[in-house]
Image (cartoon, helix red, strand yellow):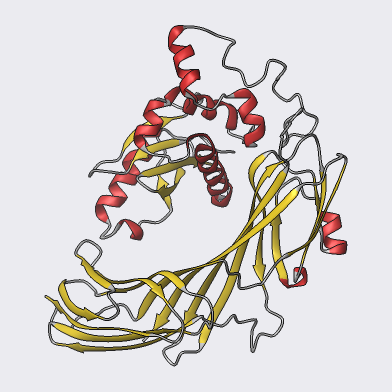
Amino acid sequence: MAIDGLIILDNTGLLRRAIAQSGFHSFPPAYPLLHIDALNNALSNARRPEDVDPVLYVGALTTDTPGACCHVQRGELRYLCPVSGDVDPLYAFAFLQTFIDILHEYFGHVSAETLKENFDVVYQLFEETLDSGGHPLTTSPNALRDIVLPPSLLHKVLSVAGVSGLATSSANSHPFASPILWRKAGVRYNHNEILLDVIETLDAIVNKNGTPAVSTVWGKVESNCKLSGTPDLLLTFSNASTLTDCAFHPCVRLQRWSRDRVLSFVPPDGKFKLMDYRYVPVSASSMNQVSIPFILRPVVKIDEHGGSIDVSLSSRLTTRTMDSVTVELYLGEGATGASCIVSHNASWSFNPKTLTLVWELKAVVPSASYTLRGSFTSTASTPRPARAFRVRFDIPQHNFSAIKIEQLKLTGENYKPYKGMRGSSLGNIEWRW
């Protein structure tokens, strides 16, 4: 068995309604409605949308094998992938993420209005990315652009006017004309450059004594390639030995990485993700832990129908500033409000929908301490807030792995490209109290 189809729902309102869906040619017309109803029922019965399982059981419409509904939410949209038979859900989720990335490549910001305005492009993408048998077909953005033209004002005007053949990207362009699937043929630029963005995310759980129970850095290298012809690149990173659990774009030659820890590849044209990895520090104290870049000192006291909160936060960094820092605490069922005082012109809020207290700091500079003090009320006689704070932050121009480009060699073309690299770090920390 394979993937049955795709459904895109508008996630606003009480009932999620379909904006677009694939053909489902091998199934009765009621089959996609069965999965939409299963999701709506699960959301209506759940206390919070986050409590709904990502894979929902869906009963059989006839005497055939029952199926499952794999779904993810991205922004104001929810994407459904019905499957039946013996199908690994990770297979469906991988295709869902690939299709969402394709939509972002075509439209930038993806919303219900964007999909409705470009419904013709969306339905063409349905047909080209998933074949009639439910197997992924063409998912490379470079190959898709030769088959399905990205939306543009000129293309729309010519389509409305009934003029054909004038909105093609090139007079000599043909689908699959290049021998390399992920790269177009005959690409030319006046200024040849390749730009790399290294984005790392620290996921950690910290015990109430301040020691990390688990801390892991996940990274990805995103590239924007504007190189003429068919260049063959050899990219060498510093600290490459600290990168493990790597996943690469199909253009990367795996044997060269396994042998020499260098990236040898013919890059796609435009934006693409070169690799994912996990960073393992060499000088870690124990269990390959990564140090947390801040200190949180929380004190939470539970009283009858409420409680008090006293939290202080300070940075461990010496030169870098942490931006967009948010500290969240779920106050538990029955929470009705909060009253807090914060320092350094920070801000706080209580979300009555999620029952969460949010403390927001625009910037946390080194050698400074930030505090939040206050209380909260609850209809429950003994409130049960979450036993951990959720802290998120950004650190621009910084990487936990300190990875850098040591060398970039180009063969196959007679020019010297410009190479640039930019780093940024994100954090998602669960700090217990």
What residue sits 73% from the left and 25% below the top? Answer: 176
Q: Where 368 sits versus 394, above or below?
A: below
Res. 130 visible in picture: no
In-image side of 228 versus 374 (left or right): right
Q: Quadrant of residue 169?
A: top right
User: Which residue is located at x 40 percent, y 72 percent?
Assistant: 363
Q: Is residue 54 above or below residue 173?
A: below
**In this rendering, would 278 be left or right of 253?**
left
Q: Nearer the viewer, residue 219 or 156?
A: 156
Foreground pick, 30 / 169 = 169
Residue 233 placed where, x, y %? 81, 49
Where is residue 306? Give x, y as percent: 15, 82
Give the answer, above or below, for where 336 lies relative to 174.
below
Residue furthest to the top: 162
- Asked if one can make out residue 303 in the rendered structure from this viewpoint, the answer is yes
Observer-nearest residue: 191 or 230? 191
Vertical side of 196 occupied by 178: above or below: above
Q: Where's residue 301, x and y in %?
A: 23, 90
